Amino acid sequence: MSGRLLRLVCTAALAAGAVLVPGSAAAAPEPGARSVAALLTELQTLYREAEKATESYNATEERLKRQRAETARLDRALARTRDSLHDSRGAAGRLARQQYQSVTGLSPYVRLLLAHDPQRALDQGHVIGQLARERAATVGRLTGDTKKAVELARRARKALDARTALAERREKERDQVRTRLHAVEALLASLTPGQLTALADLEQANTAEAQRELVASGALSSTHAPTPAGERAVRYAVEQLGKPYEWGAEGPAAFDCSGLTSKAWGAAGTPIPRTSQEQWARLERVPLDELRPGDLVVYFPEATHVALYLGDGMVVQAPRPGARIKVSPVAAAPVLGAVRPDPAGKSVRRYEPPELPAGAASGTGYAPETSAR
């Protein structure tokens, strides 16, 4: 890593509150003995821990949705197999009655030898052979349906156990998110209005410096046009400006960070993974100097935050609890990289960026009324 890039990453980390000073998420520090810079680092560390817990919760929620669907699918398949098994048992019962009620125990071969009309006997033998094959098929279906029903019942029980375990895990992760958000609330509630203003001013100054470094490095694109789907995703995200951040939310009234990006691309006709970590892991990565509107910028080493690139070095993001969806500089947090949901898409020939409403870039989220669900 070059010295200039290292300085850039460090500056971005300072702007986003990377863990520079150890702190506990369980208890708020004493604000009176700490500088504004230390308070900012502590606050942003708490926010980062809360967002990391939120993305873990989101990932478990997605797995739980898939497990519910799998459980329902297996239940339907088991019901169909049991119906088929019932029919096969009925056919097998009829077969048993027919054999019991048969008036002769002679084999088809003996009947043929004793028959006065060999041709008629041959015809009867053909019918008897056909019946025998049908009976064998009935027994085969009964055996096969029985085995299938037993296997499906085993898989259905296993799927239900997995769903129950995921539901319990989701509840634990929900509690972890709430614990971290309460720590944020406690710290914010302990600060004076002057301290809150100073925090916002310092964060803005740090972000502006990090953005200047990023632009000066030449690592940021501002000239590429979006694809048609990317343009639709951008317009969807811009339409959400001003709506509140809410952890675990996917709209329409509120969003968390990956809820916003996944819904924006879903509205554009290109479904993408729900969580920021899955978006980073599964979508195609692109260099920052090739960014086009609609691409996703992913933040922090654990890929626990994501925003949608707007163009001209800006992103649309659902930043954190207590804040609203806003436009921010790309360097508002330490950038991990960028991904593209539609790598095969062709850029539009003419692109008119959406008009931003007044106050699109305002709001820090530093307020004591942060909401924890």
Image (cartoon, grey):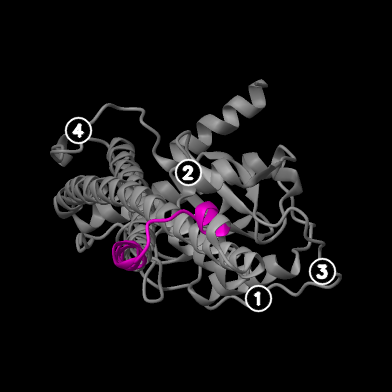
Q: Is residue 232 above or below residue 322?
A: below
Could you classify mark 4 by the number of other residues whose Cα lies within 10 Å: few (under 14), some (14-19), or many (20 or more)? few
Secondary structure of the residue carrying tag 4 is loop
Secondary structure of the residue carrying tag 1 is loop
**Badge 4 vs badge 1, beta-carbon distance below 8 Å:** no
Separation of disc 3 and disc 2 at Cα? 29 Å
Disc 3 marks which amino acid? Answer: Val
Q: Which residue is mark 4?
A: 24
Q: Which residues are magenta?
A: 89-112
Q: Which residue is mark 1?
A: 354
Residue 25, image quadrant:
top left
Q: Which residue is mark 2?
A: 277
Query: Mark 2 or mark 4, which has the lower sequence index?
Result: 4
Query: Mark 3 or mark 2, which has the lower sequence index?
Result: 2
Query: Mark 1 or mark 3, which has the lower sequence index?
Result: 3
Could you classify mark 3 by the number of other residues whose Cα lies within 10 Å: few (under 14), some (14-19), or many (20 or more)? some
Disc 4 marks which amino acid? Answer: Ser
The x and y percentages for residue 51 are: 35, 47
The x and y percentages for residue 300 are: 47, 38
